[in-house]
Image: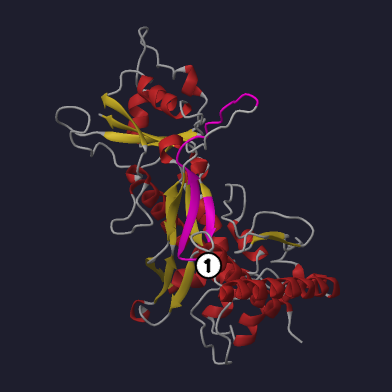
Amino acid sequence: MRNTLQLREERGAAYRTMCALADKSESRRLTNAETSDFDKAERQVKILDAQLADARNAAPEFETRGSGAERHETPDVNIIGGAGRSTTIGTRAVRGVEKEILRPDQSFAEWTNARGMGVSESRSAAHGFDWNSYWTARFHGQANAETRAVTGMGEDVSSGSGAGAGAVGQVWSAEVYDLVRARTFSHALGASTMPLMTEITNHPQFLADVAPAWVGEGTATAGDVSPSVGTIQFNAAGAFLDMAPISNNLIDDAIVTGGIDALIRNSISQKYARLIDQVLIYGQTGNAGNPGLANESGLLTQNASGAPTTYLPISQAAALVRGQSVEPSGWVWHPGNQAEFAQLKDTLNQPMRMTPDIADIPNVPSALLNYQVESGTAFTGGSASSLYLGDWSYVVIGMRTDGIQTRMLTERLAEFNQTAFFSSSRFSIRTIWPGKAMCRLYGIA
């Protein structure tokens, strides 16, 4: 009889098939064969949901995670089929295959696990197993195939010789991405996350507002062509890679103190937090899926025209966004720019107050922003800086559902008594409706 882990893995595979076909249906009509594949995968998801429900009733302790007693149920999902039909799995319909965007307070790991993409249940909970124990076993060569299978690592467990022991599974990888989010300024300002189940994901967006018209009795109306709808493409081709060497002595000390898992997570998440924030603003050269907010087509802009003397330039940038019926949620600026404005004095030589229209808008300083490097963009000579203001929920980090993947390299740096953690991540960051929601205030001297 298949265990819960196997059932979830099968459900995840079927669900991903439905997602891929739903993506295709956005650009064209599905073929008969593709429609048949969608129906087959849909039936399989329903059957597996019923089997998982039976497993939960028979062995509820298998549904706990970690060392706590938190229940983790699979939510009902509304699937939009390729033939235009809506199929509800369960009793409550929520947005599923349709591009679901997570708020900052929603967990990426919870989302992926709930859809069978990771493994949320573990028999190890009853034995007091935790991630520190897992890493301790790995470094001491005790993480055999059965241990990895029980803990849902998603590794190759085809043999008992430790095949595939270098990979950390999707559960841990998704949890690390949640830690990355918590460390970014974009998360603090309210940026969203969209789980990407395929390399290319098209998200619909309005290119113009609707324009309804009133007509009298018996009078025809022309078609409203103003709500022009287009797509913005999230392209997670390629990957960002990193290799972080760590001293084996430091690892041994962390194992003794019980902090080995935190050591590994922090060493990886700090790097990717900086990477994501930097790519979010400036993009990655040659990567179509990451143009950067500064390079998004149609982005609202406001010229600061030199060294600040008042808070009026920021007020004007906020007014541009509000003029699009969007309320700014915050702005990010370099600490140097923050200090420039903070040192402004009024006519009584007192610190100048922000104008009332921006005084309550949160702001976050970040040294990741370039500081006074925009040569001659706003005035004659010198260099300048920018700050970015708007509704950050429109800035969407599209993250592949496998999160931050990690492998251990034990032999490459053995002569230095180090172990390297080779990590990779595939993501695409785009700003939906940049001409409405976000403004770049440039030319701050």
The quadrant in which residue 294 appears is top left
| Quadrant location of the N terminus in the rendered image | bottom right
Residue at the image point whose x is 50% and y is 77% from the top = 167
Residue 414 visible: yes
Q: Residue furthest front?
A: 218
Residue 126 visible: no
Residue at the image point whose x is 73% and y is 84% from the top = 2
- Near-viewer residue (428 or 37): 37
Q: Secondary structure at mark 1?
A: loop
Residue behind mark 1: 402
Vertical position of residue 169 compared to residue 367: above or below: below
- Near-viewer residue (53 or 166): 53
Residue at the image point whose x is 19% and y is 27% from the top = 379
Vertical position of residue 192 compared to residue 117: above or below: above
Residue 36: x and y in percent read 62, 75
- Near-viewer residue (16 or 136): 16
Residues shaded magenta: 193-217
Residue 102 included in the magenta stretch of the image: no
